[in-house]
Image: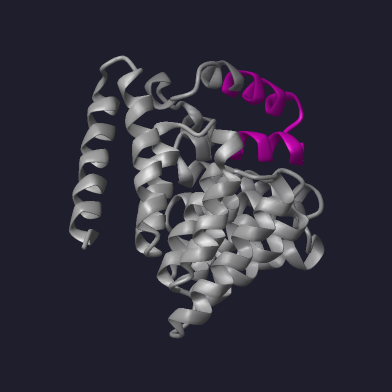
Amino acid sequence: MMSLLLVSSAAWSHSGDAHLLNQLNRQLETNPDSQQTLIRRGSLFVRAKKFELAEQDFSDAKKFGDPAVVFLPLGISYYESSKFELAAEQFDRYLKRYPNNGAALEYRAKAAREMGLYSVALKYFKTFLKHSPYLNPGHFLTTAEIALIATANEQANIDAAISIIDSGIVHLGINPQLQQFAIELELKRNQVDSAIIRQQSLAISTGESPQWHLQMGTLLLIAGRNDDAALELEAASDKIKKKRRTPSLIQLKKQAEQLHLALKTKQP
């Protein structure tokens, strides 16, 4: 078996992994029945995309302790090698023992998503949000994106997605990423006033930047509040003039020009 473990150093994308492999090999030479060491080496092989070697280590690890602890790393190996159905089976077995494990819930959700089972994916993503202590905006955005395609009812999907985003805002505080996505969703369900309120909530965190004024002006224009939109355009233009010329500033100027033209077409 040791001949199988002579993996080229070029296979290791993470600094120190080749050295760690040598350490684990030495440990297994003196203690070949160590389940934890086999799991660690198997996980190292997964990272190097040496999935056959990983699965052999995980198979051996099941013989030397509680097999349940192997279900999660074996499932991750299957997931990373695009064997999504096999991965889901392993995650299900692990979750029977550890139903609130955040990593298993997230991987189970992602496996369902890869299989096109969006309602199942949504269920696991939402459970993950309830139980994981380490959440970031991306977790809520991913779950909301799944909610948008979970059923055939577009309106219900949008409502569910906004509910998920709002739960993220409650959990993490006002967050530009989450609020911007919610604004897009409010516009999809024709709730312009709600979108404006959300934009107002970003004034402090964005410092009322030119971008903030332009987006507020655009929302006000959609709402038919042309005079208020013109004021926001004026504020944005004043701030743009004070900034150093950069590619992003040029793009802002183009946006301001577009808003100016849109306002002109609305004038009687």
Q: Is residue 78 visible?
A: yes
Q: Looking at the picture, does residue 79 appear above or below residue 115?
A: above
Q: Residue visible at 42% across and 51% down? A: 228
Q: Which residues are magenta?
A: 21-43
Residue at 44% x, 25% y is 13
Q: Tell me if residue 199 is in the magenta stretch.
A: no
Name the magenta segment's main secondary structure: helix
The N terminus lies in quadrant = top right
Q: Quadrant of the C terminus?
A: bottom left
Task: Tell me residue 70's x, y (percent).
Answer: 70, 52
Q: How far across and how far down the image is residue 19, in percent? A: 57, 15
| Quadrant housing residue 233 | top left
User: Looking at the image, which is closer to me, 241 or 31?
Assistant: 241
Residue at 62% from the left image edge and 34% from the top image edge: 41
Most extreme residue toward the bottom is 153
Q: How many marks?
A: 0
Residue drawn 47% across the image and 70% down it: 148
